[in-house]
């Protein structure tokens, strides 16, 4: 019998560690590289002007000849949203995805005119994919979107299991979680487990999706007028429950928001959302029905300025406006960093006369799709891994998950709390730390697929917080003399009564420039003098550090 060649396997994340979102995990040896998920992270207010945050793909581009396939666990944006950007940077021969995720990916690639760049193959729990020395199989999990799976990667060095996003919901909306397969894998032996950590701070069990249905019905029972429900467009299970409740209460459904319309259309085609055509009406027909005959389904549960709910609340939507007696429901939990935007949105809706319902102890109108501590304990007991790497979560969540594993008997030295770019090496069924790979963030602003660097974002934050000064000096390069007084232009940095201080700063800058012009110098040195003297002076007077932009004009 021919013995397989031993090739140490690297396991690392380019996104998803130390953050919620942007999931991308890689498994690599000397011959091949496979990727699990390619997501985006949605920016909060700390990223002005940014549409998406995706991983830095430098390491993948440097190893483009080894990239064999992308495996998708489910159809949420933080797992599939980065695919169009990834495909514009390197070739992915084939994408393996569950049925619903495959349809959502296909639609997204058609929008970006990238469908010809790759091949999309649908898998299920019976599929086995052989990629060089890797054998990849799948097990079904429950989550807040149908067709969610964990991934098993068998290598010559040992077995790696990734749970994907999951929760152990015993009364799910859709198929059951494959607990029997998880137990089988544990009996067969799991060398390294990667497991979802998003709810690792919460004790007990995550409530079932069935609980949410009862709460949604209660909202419908008590709403005197229109019900406006905002949730993620990819939360297909929740959308189905909302539609069921609308049908039960004889309400017509208006779908607002392009991403919501497309998600519902695709899910109806595949049978995941069941709504009669007659129950859906266009937004322009809203005036043909009484308020208590309508439910409006829209995006914007995170307070995003460009989403449908924001446009409705601000009066910018052409057909839908908030009216007295409306009930607005936020059927989602806040993504870390979005709390301020959500609070502003709630205040605006309340000011317009709406009754706003959010998830609370008194109102279970949202259930997380992620496992709480008891579910994490059960998963660890079923898989019985030799080594453990918490994934998908902020650092404190990863750390809590690792400590939880240690209470179940996994040695501390066998648990690894990593950052994006950190590497684990699997060799002869043993896991050790390796060398880091290139990683980081790429900020997508508009249509520029190359993204913006961290330095650009630092500049944007500085402009947002402290404003800017442009300082212009005019120099005669032949005589080394100033041609005219230094001019100051300010934006967002000082108040109107700062003229005396500006004149004082101008004199300091001119004095230093004149002294420097008496010696051999260049434009770069003159700019440094302007930036240093003006920056120090303004900080001393205002305790702020605005961006200083020196402009040197020369007469030859």
Image (tube, rainbow, N blue to C red):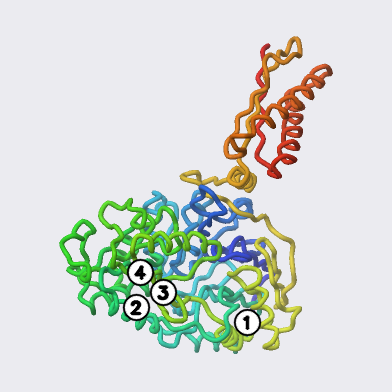
Nearest to N terminus: mark 3 or mark 2: 3
Nearest to N terminus: mark 3 or mark 4: 3
Q: Which residue is mark 4?
A: 355
- Find numbered disc 3 in the image and state the secondary structure of the residue it sits on: loop
User: Callout 2 environment at 10 Å: few (<14), some (14 to 19), or many (20+)?
Assistant: many
Q: Which residue is mark 3?
A: 147
User: Callout 1 environment at 10 Å: few (<14), some (14 to 19), or many (20+)?
Assistant: many
Classify 106 as above or below 136.
above
User: Callout 4 environment at 10 Å: few (<14), some (14 to 19), or many (20+)?
Assistant: some
Label 3 or label 2, whichever lies nearer to me, is 2
The percent coordinates of residue 338 (x first, y second) are 52, 62
| Viewport quadrant of the C terminus | top right
- Find numbered disc 4 in the image and state the secondary structure of the residue it sits on: strand
| Residue 99 visible to the viewer | no
Label 1 or label 4, whichever lies nearer to me, is 4
Viewer-proximal residue, 467 or 241?
Answer: 467
Residues marked 1 and 4 touching at CB (< 8 Å) = no
Give the alpha-carbon distance from disc 1 to disc 2, as whole Å.
Answer: 40 Å
Nearest to N terminus: mark 3 or mark 1: 3
Nearest to N terminus: mark 2 or mark 4: 2
Give the alpha-carbon distance from disc 2 to disc 4, as whole Å.
Answer: 15 Å
Give the alpha-carbon distance from disc 3 to disc 4, as whole Å.
Answer: 34 Å
**Horizontal placement of 121 versus 199: left or right?**
left
Q: Which residue is mark 1?
A: 190
Give the alpha-carbon distance from disc 3 to disc 2, as whole Å.
Answer: 23 Å
Q: Which residue is mark 2?
A: 216
Viewer-proximal residue, 523 or 514?
Answer: 514
Residues marked 3 and 1 touching at CB (< 8 Å) = no
Label 2 or label 4, whichever lies nearer to me, is 4
Nearest to N terminus: mark 1 or mark 4: 1
User: Callout 3 environment at 10 Å: few (<14), some (14 to 19), or many (20+)?
Assistant: many
């Amino acid at each position: 019998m021919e013995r397989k060649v031993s090739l140490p396997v690297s396991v690392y994340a380019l996104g998803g560690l130390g953050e919620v979102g942007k999931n991308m995990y890689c498994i690599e040896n000397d011959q091949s590289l496979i990727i699990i998920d390619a997501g985006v992270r949605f920016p909060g207010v700390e990223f002005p002007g940014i549409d998406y945050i995706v991983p830095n793909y430098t390491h993948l581009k440097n190893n483009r000849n080894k990239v064999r396939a992308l495996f998708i666990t489910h159809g949420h944006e933080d797992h599939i949203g980065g695919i169009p950007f990834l495909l514009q940077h390197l070739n992915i021969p084939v994408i393996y995805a569950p049925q619903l995720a495959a349809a959502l990916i296909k639609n997204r690639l058609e929008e970006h005119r990238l469908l010809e760049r790759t091949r999309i193959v649908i898998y299920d729990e019976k599929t086995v994919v052989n990629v060089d020395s890797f054998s990849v199989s799948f097990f079904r999990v429950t989550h807040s979107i149908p067709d969610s799976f964990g991934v098993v990667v068998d290598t010559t060095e040992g077995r790696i299991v990734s749970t994907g996003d999951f929760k152990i919901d015993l009364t799910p909306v859709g198929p059951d979680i494959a607990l029997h397969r998880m137990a089988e894998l544990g009996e067969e032996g799991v060398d390294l487990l990667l497991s979802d950590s998003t709810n690792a701070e919460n004790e007990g069990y995550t409530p079932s999706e069935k609980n949410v249905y009862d709460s949604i019905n209660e909202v419908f029972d008590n709403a005197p007028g229109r019900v406006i429900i905002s949730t993620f467009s990819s939360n297909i299970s929740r959308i189905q429950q909302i539609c069921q409740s609308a049908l039960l209460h004889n309400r017509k459904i208006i779908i607002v928001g392009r991403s919501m319309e497309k998600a519902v259309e695709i899910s109806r085609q595949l049978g995941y959302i069941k709504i009669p055509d007659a129950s859906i009406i266009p937004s322009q027909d809203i005036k043909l029905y009484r308020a208590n005959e309508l439910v409006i389904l829209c995006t914007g549960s995170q307070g995003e300025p460009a989403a449908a709910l924001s446009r409705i609340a601000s009066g910018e939507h052409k057909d839908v406006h908030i009216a007295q007696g409306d009930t607005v429901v936020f059927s989602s939990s806040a993504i870390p960093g979005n709390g301020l935007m959500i609070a502003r949105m709630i205040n605006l809706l309340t000011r317009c006369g709406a009754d706003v319902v959010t998830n609370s102890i008194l109102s279970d109108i949202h259930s997380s799709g992620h496992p709480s501590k008891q579910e994490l304990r059960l998963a660890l007991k079923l898989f019985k891994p030799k080594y453990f790497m918490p994934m998908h979560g902020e650092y404190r969540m990863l750390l809590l998950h690792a400590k939880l594993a240690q209470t179940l008997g996994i040695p501390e030295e066998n648990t690894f709390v990593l950052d994006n770019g950190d590497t684990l090496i699997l060799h002869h069924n043993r896991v050790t730390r390796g060398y880091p790979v290139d990683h980081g963030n790429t900020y997508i602003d508009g249509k520029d697929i190359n993204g913006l660097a961290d330095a650009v974002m630092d500049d944007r934050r500085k402009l947002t917080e402290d404003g800017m000064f442009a300082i212009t000096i005019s120099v005669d390069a032949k005589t080394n003399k100033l041609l005219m007084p230094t001019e100051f232009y300010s934006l967002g940095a000082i108040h109107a009564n700062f003229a005396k201080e500006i004149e004082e700063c101008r004199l300091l800058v001119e004095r230093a420039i004149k002294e420097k012009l008496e010696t051999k110098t260049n434009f770069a040195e003159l700019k440094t003098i302007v930036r240093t003297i003006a920056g120090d002076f303004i900080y001393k007077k205002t305790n702020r550090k605005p961006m200083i932009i020196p402009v040197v004009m020369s007469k030859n």
